[in-house]
Image (cartoon, grey):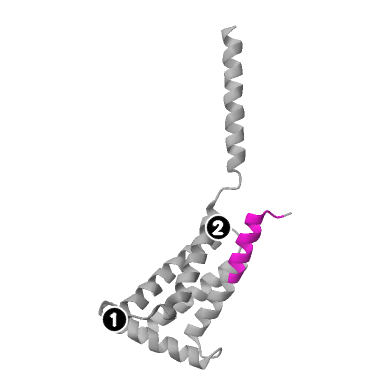
């Protein structure tokens, strides 16, 4: 039987992965929703205007949108399909993307309802990462340390006798 921790990690990984694949795809193509794609194009134009430094290093609004969309699709697929440590790396990258998105929304002065999803999914990514990084065998280590300490004490008693 799987532990509650494992079930939580798998459920969060799958749900978050699908969400980011969906959102990244919306940023990359109008096939899912033309309205949402148009809104993403408009939003990223305002982000690029608010950050003139991006233009100086050659990053246009289109490139910024495609970079973030590609990161979301790639990391979302890893969260959904790939087992092990790569999920934690993808989780961390998506967390950085969410922080950047929150920064962009604050920079252009968007109201909370425009970026609440980024806030919620950033919190979910943080929770998933914290749960995944908790050690499974921590209580066992403490037990083995206590047993080792008792064994050492017994050996010392035998030597003193």
In the depicted structure, whether residue 61 falls above or below residue 135: below
Q: Nearer the viewer, residue 73 or 117?
A: 117
Q: Secondary structure at mark 2?
A: helix
Span colored in magenta: 2-15
Mark in the foreground, 2 or 1: 1
Instruction: Name which quarter of the figure residue 18 lies in.
Output: bottom right
Question: Residue at 51% across / 84% down in the picture?
Answer: 26
Question: Residue at 63% across / 63% down in the picture?
Answer: 10
Q: Which residue does the numbered mark 2 point to in the structure image? A: 85
Question: Farthest residue in the right direction?
Answer: 1
Instruction: Name which quarter of the figure residue 112 lies in.
Output: bottom left
Q: Secondary structure at mark 1?
A: helix
Q: Is residue 4 magenta?
A: yes
Q: Which residue does the numbered mark 1 point to in the structure image? A: 50
The N terminus - image quarter: bottom right
Question: Residue at 59% across / 66% down in the picture?
Answer: 13
- Comes first in the chain, label 2 or label 1: 1
């Amino acid at each position: 039987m799987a532990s509650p921790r494992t079930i939580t990690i798998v459920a969060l990984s799958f749900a978050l992965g699908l969400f980011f694949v969906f959102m990244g795809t919306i940023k990359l193509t109008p096939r899912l929703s033309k309205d949402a794609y148009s809104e993403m194009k408009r939003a990223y134009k305002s982000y690029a205007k608010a950050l003139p430094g991006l233009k100086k290093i050659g990053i246009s609004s289109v490139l910024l949108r495609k970079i973030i969309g590609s990161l979301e699709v790639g990391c979302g697929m890893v969260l959904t399909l790939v087992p092990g440590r790569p999920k934690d790396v993808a989780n961390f990258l998506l967390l950085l993307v969410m922080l950047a998105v929150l920064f962009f929304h604050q920079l252009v002065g968007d109201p909370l309802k425009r970026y609440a999803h980024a806030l919620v999914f950033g919190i979910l990514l943080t929770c998933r990462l914290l749960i995944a990084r908790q050690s499974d065998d921590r209580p066992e280590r403490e037990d083995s340390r206590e047993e080792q300490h008792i064994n050492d004490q017994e050996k010392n008693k035998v030597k003193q006798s």
